[in-house]
Amino acid sequence: MHRWFETQAEAKPETIAITCGDVEISYRDLNAQANQLARELVRLGIGPDSLVGICLDRSPRMVVALLAVLKAGGAYVPLDPSYPQERLRFMLCDADVSVLLTETNFLEKLNDYNGPRLCLDADCAAFAAHSIENLALEVAPENLAYVIYTSGSTGQPKGAMITHRGLANYLRWAADEYDVANGCGALLHSSISFDLTVTSLFTPLIVGRGVFLTGDGVEALAEALLARTNYSLVKITPAHLRALAELLPANEIAGRARALIIGGEALHFESLAFWRKHAPATRLINEYGPTETVVGCCVYEVAPEDPDSGPVPIGRAIANTQLRVLAADLTPVTEGEMGELFIGGDGVACGYLNRTELTRERFVTIQSQRMYRSGDLVRTMPDGNLAYAGRVDDQVKIRGYRIELGEIETVLRQHDAVSDCAVVVCDAAGDEKRMVAFIVENRPADDDIRAWLETRLPEYMVPTGFVHVDSLPLTINGKVDRIALSAQAPAAAADAAYVKARTPAEETLAGIWSEVLKVDPVGVNDNFFDLGGDSILGTLILARAARAGLKLSPSQLFEYQTIAELATVAVSVN
């Protein structure tokens, strides 16, 4: 990938590669800075298959760091600065990174790491004198490009090892298939630890187009979309898609993006109605792919004649990728019959870092071909496209993030007051899902279990509801009856007794919460998070409140979590 980028830097040195607010960096300067940092990494011993941790916010420095690691021959390990310190500590220890690239404001979170580190803000003098010329280092297709951590069923995240061959295969296919060169570039709004970033960042850079870095949150994404036209692509999740339909003016979205690449979780045609009506020229593409197969391995492009409702197919394999739908005994199923999806080809990961047994379990040989056993259930439609049908295990997708419920349960059981627990997923607003934790306590907790969990798991893995029960229901086989718990979850959403709205502001907010969260009725003492709220749904509530004449900030919604509290700080703008 970095060789393709260097070719563009030579051919288009003055073209702007990175835009971040008022900061613009040309291809020449981006390549020069990455070369200087790469030489410092080589001096520190980085070479093929060396692992380099990158703990940086979404910024030009982050892009320089990623390119520098690849140029030095190493593989990057993305570390989201927003992750709890304990999770960052585990990833650094598990990956045993050779060097850590970060900034001074993150050092406190990373103080358990004792290896070499470079702060790209304070230590820039260490490599500023190095040559800006490209490095003459050979990197083989089988060398690692990155190791990205995903949720693990055993209670700890696991690192999927992706090669240059797999990365290059996906990027070249995506750049061509999505016609990236004929737009102005892509918006980058996602976390460095979310492989959605791979598409948004690298496809523009290999064809000489721009990368536009946004602030955090879906509102920043909406603002960036309205800031210019003709984006080559915007990579988003279905949750982003639904939120943007609320935030963007219908008469202003046509021509903003040539393509919306939608991935991360199941997609339904209903979520596309806004875009199909108001931006009919924008391509809508459902991209499916586990982290273990480099972002995307299968795609479906929505056609005008497609239906208005129902699930969108996941489509057909991308270049140099083979898909098999097999029964439990690993024999092929017939058309229309449900089976597990096995993925082979250039994009299949090497396996999991330091997880020999898990690698042997998930990466198997089928008819002399090494394939990844996805755990996803699919069926082949009459037209040859694949339709997603569910999971064979407890893995779920929430807002595009892949989550093993077992990991959350393992961490919860580490709380002194928790004797047993189970986390289930139930339906929430629209196509959204919400996680609810059912907890059996051996004694009253001395602290807020939600707050305790937030210090150990990323925000997206913290359940939105917590229900205290005397015991967990069991099936006749002695296993936790998750179906029974899922049925209880909506009824147990609010701990407080129902209290009807008493003021105009409370009545307005209750109506908005009910519409967005799909809960009826909503009492003024019900908790936003217990009802299934999250950051994206919060954005929708704020937008609707503003249209109704009530001004609120995102921080207020998270600080004042009931309607009764929120109504006291809402400012009337009528």
Image: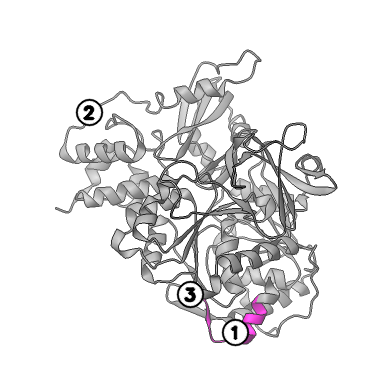
Rendering quarter of residue 510: top left
Q: Which mark lies nearer to you, 1 or 2?
A: 1
Q: Are marks 1 and 2 in contact (CB under 8 Å)?
A: no
**How far apart are the alpha carbons under marks 1 and 3?**
18 Å
In the picture of the structure, the residue carrying the numbered disc 1 is 28
Could you tell me the amino acid type at mark 2? Lys
Task: Depth check: give the residue in front, 211 or 367.
Answer: 367
Residue on which the image places disc 2: 500
Amino acid type assigned to the residue bearing label 1 in the image = Arg
| Left or right: 350, with 465 as reference point | right
**Mark 3 secondary-structure assignment:** loop
Residue at point 59%, 79% (across, down): 30
Residue 184, disc? 3
The mark lying in front, picked from 3 and 2, is 3
Q: Crowding near pointer 1: few (<14 within 10 Å), some, many (20+)?
A: many
Most extreme residue toward the front is 382
| Callout 3 amino acid | Cys
What is the span of residues highlighted in magenta in the rendered image?
A: 5-17
Mark identifier at residue 514: none
| Observer able to see residue 57 | yes
Q: Residue 474 location, x and y as percent?
A: 59, 16
Q: Would you call the spot at circle 2 few (<14 residues within 10 Å), some (14-19), or many (20 or more)?
A: some
Q: Where is residue 534 drawn, in percent x and y?
A: 42, 43
**How dense is the environment of label 3, judged by Cα within 10 Å: few (below 14), some, or many (20 and up)?**
many
Q: Quadrant of the N terminus?
A: bottom right
Q: Work out whether mark 1 precedes mark 3 in sequence or the reverse, and give the earlier one.
A: 1
Q: Is residue 23 above or below residue 399?
A: below
> Looking at this view, is 339 or 487 the one in front?
339
* Tag 2 secondary structure: loop
Q: Is residue 387 above or below residue 103?
A: above
1 or 2: tag closer to the N-terminus: 1
Q: Residue furthest top?
A: 476
